[in-house]
Image (tube, grey):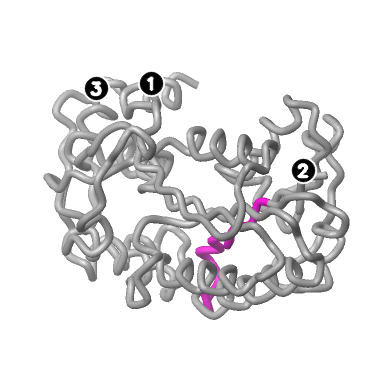
Amino acid sequence: MIAVMGAAGNVGGKVADLLLRRQEQVRVFQHARRLDELEERGAEVVAGAAAEVGDLRPLFDGAEAALVLVPEDVAQPRFVATRSRITAAVVQALREARMPHVVALSAVGADRANAPGPQRGLHELERRLSELADSNVLVLRSAAYMDYLLASLPLIRSQRINGSAVNGDLRFPMIATRDVAWEAAERLARRDFAGHQVKLLLGPEDVSLRQATGAIGALLGMAELPYVELPPADMRRALAGAGMSEEAASVMVDMQLALNDGRYFDGVRRTPATATPTRLEEFLKEALDR
């Protein structure tokens, strides 16, 4: 049995799908959106709250491996504290289950204790997982998800611009979540790691948001779609207006500013082992053709 958190999300859902295609026994955690389709395909569904150890116990009980992550509930007013509670609950439930193999989703920059943005919470996850003496743990530190570019589509379609607080010409690694999911599913199925390991996943190339915006515009029939660099205060207001809590919006803007300062990818170099196959143009074409 393989337990999967985040099965309604971009990565966890793809991991559950890949494992079911391999005819693995899968148990998924339902904490918000229903997982009827996965259940119909044979997955066992456990419902509960990710911050409650008692709700996580049935997910992990008797499993041979688990995919764990910290869900980003960006509408949560106490965004940071909630993520910390979830981390503590997940690790405690793994400890009680004496989980043999754990694959954890993290992000580049989470190795730094003072990392701004969501990476600070992921640093806590990695630190707590390192204390699991009875588990073999593989942490997947991924580049920025290409999928997050799609969150700008309402702005692009309504205002015919794209923007954020990130320097539009800054090139940094981006990765498609399907490539992260493929790596996670493979390692969960093979369980070929021992001790505590970290693997970087950096996508096939570095990309700027101005370049990504141009590619989106071309596919949407908006020639020369502009990318606008927004002041941090304006970006916080825009994110809050889109449904984020004030705290979550502030954390996300901190992440964007950290990208500008090079605090995540400084010293990170792509190698054949850390590169993944899906290019931005391929990802966008498939996503926007749906």
**Residue position for label 3:** 218
Q: Residue at x 40, y 43 (%)?
A: 201
Out of 183 and 164, give the one closest to the viewer.
183
Mark closer to the chain start, 3 or 1: 3
**Magenta stretch bounds:** 67-79
In the rendered structure, the answer to whether residue 284 lies left or right of residue 184 reads: left
The mark closer to the camera, 3 or 2, is: 2
**Residue position for label 1:** 285
Would residue 44 be seen by someone viewing this image from the given angle? Answer: yes
Would residue 14 be seen by someone viewing this image from the given angle? Answer: no
The mark closer to the camera, 3 or 1, is: 1
Residue 113 at x, y percent in the picture: 37, 76
Mark closer to the chain start, 3 or 2: 2
In the rendered structure, the answer to whether residue 191 lies left or right of residue 116 reads: right
Q: Is residue 77 magenta?
A: yes
Q: Is residue 196 magenta?
A: no
Out of 257 and 272, give the one closest to the viewer.
272
**Distance Cα–Cα, label 3 vs label 2:** 35 Å
Q: Which element carries disc 1, helix, strand or loop?
A: helix
Quick one: which residue is furthest to the front in this view? 194
Residue 240 at x, y percent in the picture: 40, 66
Q: Quadrant of residue 96?
A: bottom right
> Mark 1–mark 2 contact, CB under 8 Å?
no
**Distance Cα–Cα, label 1 vs label 2:** 27 Å
Q: Residue at x 66, y 55 (%)?
A: 102
